[in-house]
Image (cartoon, rainbow, N blue to C red):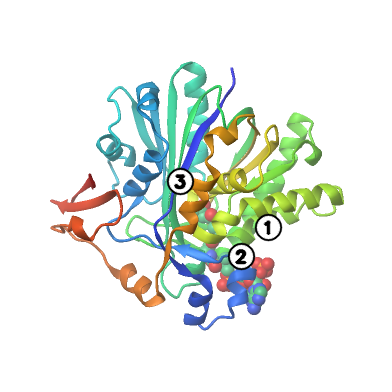
């Protein structure tokens, strides 16, 4: 049975800061941020937005009544959860008008969560032919104002419907994975911002890629020549570049040039949005689908979540993907955003809603929003 991604869509907050302006405000050479880190813009969510509202928005962009009828599984991958008990998935039931006979839960393993969801969805569909699974990645990446990680922040969500006879990407059901207890990045429950050993995290990431790529080649008897594209987890675009560069000199010059060209197409959205944590790999897939993908291509995916879990798997772009992927509409989401000043970004960053907060719907520009916090319970609404 062919199983994979039948639909994929994303949501990004409508405001962003310009990375050159951020560099100037921090007294840093802008080339460090645009070339050294590889970012141009950074999405900034409003305080009435969170992992729940962004997940609702990305899923809403692809779900039809027909899809909802066939759904049997909903998985949300996030490390920006709003509740230590209730899953982000449960909050989505009303917002998305989902049917009750659905198994739903949240997965956390740093930026690996959505890939764990995707592979679980694969197994679900193979055991329940005809049923569909909704997998959502949703995160707000925060390191804090004036920290080294600030330039690698971002926010957004990617939603995917996994089904039989997928129209976007067929998963090959070939994968290798690994887990190590590593202290490269963590966010204790008391903290809204992450702690990271940034450079160490780069080293672990590259080491995981090399280890998994060696395992993948040995297990499936393949080489880089079997793939035209490699997509990477891209918390900031220089990080994927570091993994890709490990292939230089080990594959033919023509293959390296092809992989580099395709990688550049896959990072366009991330350069303009920033870090989606677990959605980053899948924002890369969307960027590639919009900017360069060809039907029939074999694509290798490198998923990495600090802490750390890595997985390398492959899939094939499907013949009809252009019927499902509305390239112009997806590009418009990136283009139709507005720039926020660094002062406004810093002001919004500090806002923290407390118990008793009631948000005035007249101030909202998004379909889904946090409307109230009552007895410490977060309540959400959808603008009609
Ligand atoms: N012009 C061009 N390039 C310049 C430059 C200039 N003027 N000045 C510096 N650079 C280059 C440097 O040479 C360097 O390039 P390389 O990495 O290729 O060597 C790059 O800019 C960054 O410079 P530094 O290493 O000096 O930067 P830094 O000390 O500010 O740290 C960082 C950068 C480690 C990425 C930091 O931003 C950070 O800690 N970020 C947060 C952690 C992070 O993003 N980790 C990876 C994510 S892990 C993950 O994805 C988490 C998960 O699972 C949830």
C-alpha separation, residue under disc 2 versus residue under disc 3: 21 Å
Of 43 and 325, the residue lying toward us: 325
Q: Is mark 3 within 8 Å of ligand 1?
A: no
Cβ atoms under marks 1 and 2 closer than 8 Å: yes
Mark nearer the N terminus (1 vs 2): 2
Q: Is residue 278 above or below residue 241?
A: above
Q: Position of residue 278 (x, y in %)?
A: 49, 48
Mark nearer the N terminus (1 vs 3): 3
Mark nearer the N terminus (2 vs 3): 3
Q: Is residue 120 above or below residue 307?
A: above
Mark 1 = which residue? 241
**Which residue lies most toward the bottom here?**
27
Of 252 and 321, the residue lying toward us: 321
Q: Position of residue 179 (x, y in %)?
A: 57, 42
Which quarter shows the C terminus?
A: top left
Can I make out residue 206 in this image?
A: no
Q: Secondary structure at mark 1?
A: helix
Q: Residues within 10 Å of mark 3 (few under 14, many from 20)?
A: many
Of 365 and 368, the residue lying toward us: 365
State left or right for residue 3 relative to residue 141: right
Residue 61 is tagged as none
C-alpha separation, residue under disc 1 versus residue under disc 3: 23 Å
State left or right for residue 160 relative to residue 304: left
Residue 38 is tagged as 2
Mark 3 = which residue? 10
Can I make out residue 65 in this image?
A: yes
Q: Nearer the viewer, mark 1 or mark 3?
A: 3
Q: Is mark 1 within 8 Å of ligand 1?
A: yes
Ligand 1 visible in quadrant: bottom right
Q: Secondary structure at mark 3?
A: strand
Q: Residues within 10 Å of mark 1 (few under 14, many from 20)?
A: some
């Amino acid at each position: 049975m062919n199983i994979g991604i039948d639909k994929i869509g994303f949501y990004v907050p409508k405001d962003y800061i310009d990375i050159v302006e951020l560099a100037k405000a921090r007294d840093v050479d802008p080339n460090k941020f645009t070339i050294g880190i590889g970012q141009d813009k950074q999405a900034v969510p409003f305080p009435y937005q969170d992992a729940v509202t962004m997940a609702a928005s990305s899923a809403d962009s692809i779900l039809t009544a027909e899809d909802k009828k066939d759904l049997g599984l909903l998985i949300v991958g996030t490390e920006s959860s709003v509740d230590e008990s209730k899953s982000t998935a449960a909050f989505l039931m009303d917002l998305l008008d989902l049917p009750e006979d659905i198994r739903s839960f949240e997965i956390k393993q740093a930026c690996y969560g959505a890939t764990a969801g995707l592979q679980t969805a694969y197994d679900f569909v193979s055991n329940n032919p005809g049923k569909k699974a909704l997998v959502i990645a949703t995160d707000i990446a925060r390191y804090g104002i004036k920290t080294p990680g600030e330039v690698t922040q971002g926010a957004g969500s990617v939603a995917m419907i996994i089904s039989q006879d997928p129209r976007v990407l067929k998963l090959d059901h070939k994968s290798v994975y690994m887990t190590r207890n590593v202290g490269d990045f963590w966010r204790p429950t008391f903290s809204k911002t992450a702690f990271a050993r940034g450079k160490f995290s780069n080293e672990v990431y590259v080491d995981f890629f090399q280890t998994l790529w060696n395992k993948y080649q040995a297990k499936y008897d393949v080489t880089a020549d079997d793939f035209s594209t490699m997509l990477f987890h891209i918390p900031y675009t220089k990080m994927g570049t570091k993994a890709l560069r490990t292939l230089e000199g080990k594959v033919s010059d023509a293959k390296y040039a092809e992989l580099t060209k395709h990688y550049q197409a896959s990072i366009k959205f991330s350069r303009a949005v920033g870090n989606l944590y677990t959605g980053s790999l899948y924002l890369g897939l969307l960027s590639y689908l919009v900017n360069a993908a060809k039907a029939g291509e074999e694509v290798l995916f490198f998923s990495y979540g600090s802490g750390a879990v890595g997985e390398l798997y492959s899939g094939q772009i499907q013949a009809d993907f252009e019927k499902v992927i509305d390239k112009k509409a997806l590009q418009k989401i990136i283009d139709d955003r507005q720039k926020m000043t660094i002062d406004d970004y810093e002001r919004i960053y500090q806002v923290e809603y407390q118990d008793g907060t009631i948000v005035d719907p007249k101030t909202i520009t998004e379909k889904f929003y946090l409307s109230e916090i009552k007895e410490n319970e977060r309540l959400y609404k959808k603008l009609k």
